[in-house]
Amino acid sequence: MTFSANPLVTAVEAPPIAEALSWLETDRFGPETPLIDVSQAVPGYNQDPGLAAHIAECAQIPGTAIYTDIEGKPNLRAALAAEMSGVYGGEVTASHILISAGCNQAFFLSLAGLAKAGDEVVMAAPWYFNHKMTADMLGIGVIPLPCRDEQAQIPDPDEAARLLTTKTKAIVLVSPNNPTGAIYPADVLDRFFQLAQANNIALIVDETYRDFLPSDYGRPHDLFQRPDWDGTLVHLYSFSKVFCMTGYRAGAIATGPAFIAEIAKLMDCLAICAPHISQRGALWGIEHLNGWRQEKRALMAERVAAFEAAIGNGGAGFEIASIGAYFAYLRHPFEGEPAATVAKRLAKTQNLLCLPGTMFGPGQDRMLRFAFANVESARMAEIVQRLGQL
């Protein structure tokens, strides 16, 4: 290559999932030791047959192949707004919603619309690695907000307040969290909202895994009930996990109409709107799959309980730091050994693929992330057995 690449892009770390997959040596193992892949958060069950049939029908409609509305199909925006109003108890309208090509794009659009190169965001650490990669590519500084074991991996708004500077444009939170699985209590989110509002910055809350909260959890938070929510909150959501549409790329942003109009310019510039087929599938899911959604919520709770029980029944020295939704964040017992080394050993000697905590930020060398959502409950004991054999 004779031309030079953007140094902001070349400095970004390699995509973590691809790196982890390179560790596999599956030809070393026989059928009695099949690969257990807990590296990537994907649904561990098939798409609802009715949704699959609807998507297939939509593919035959000529209009499905053309460009869609920049801000998303009006009927999907209205349906999501109505659902959110019911879930959170506030007032959300279609004017508050932009449909994106996945939640990662929703975050990119939000961050690019809020901050420029040289600005900063405070990001709860450990963080979702794609959020950090996006900030790095845009030249936006990331200030880590540590989430500690003694706080159940919940970030502290008072500590965040001490990290704010004149360069800070947003605070970034993910709940239920990726990678830790920790669920941020409503009162903590409320304090973060008040902090952001008092400092005239945005609070970005990514709730990709909201649909997998415990069935008795209740309302996730009351932020949408504030009359001024849309002047501070930038809420991100994904249809990918709940409706098994990870390959279709459909997400959403909920915030003030004025900011929606600004980030719609970015969407138009990128010319990568969520495809018609993705949006039609998401709309059908909202309209028809509430019961199916609740079944999968219960299934994930069952897998959480099975993983906890398996680790608690002799976890070979591995300890759960936090767990919830799709993820368990484990502390490995090999003091002084880097998390990446432990993860590679698990892949190469046990055919068990997980991610080291160091892929999610600084200070995570004793941690491993297990995305157990794609593993049946009956196989959790097998995971622990392989941990013991390490």
Image: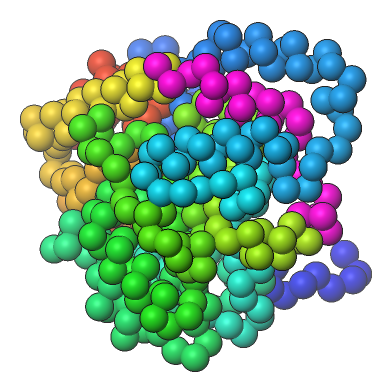
The reply, left or right, for residue 12 in relation to residue 205 is right
Q: Is residue 380 above or below residue 363?
A: above
Q: Position of residue 139 (x, y in %)?
A: 64, 76
Residue visible at 64% across and 34% down in the picture: 76
Residue visible at 52% across and 17% down in the picture: 288
Q: Is residue 354 magenta?
A: no
Q: Nearer the viewer, residue 41 or 275?
A: 275
| Residue interval drawn in magenta | 267-291
Q: Quadrant of the C terminus?
A: top left
Q: Quadrant of residue 4?
A: bottom right
Q: Quadrant of the N terminus?
A: bottom right
Q: Is residue 346 visible?
A: no
Q: Is residue 240 above or below residue 144?
A: above
The reply, left or right, for residue 306 in relation to residue 140 is left
Question: Which SS type dominates the magenta stretch?
Answer: helix
Residue visible at 51% across and 48% down in the picture: 92
Q: Position of residue 300 (x, y in %)?
A: 32, 27
Residue furthest left as drawn:
313
Q: Position of residue 41 (x, y in %)?
A: 46, 37
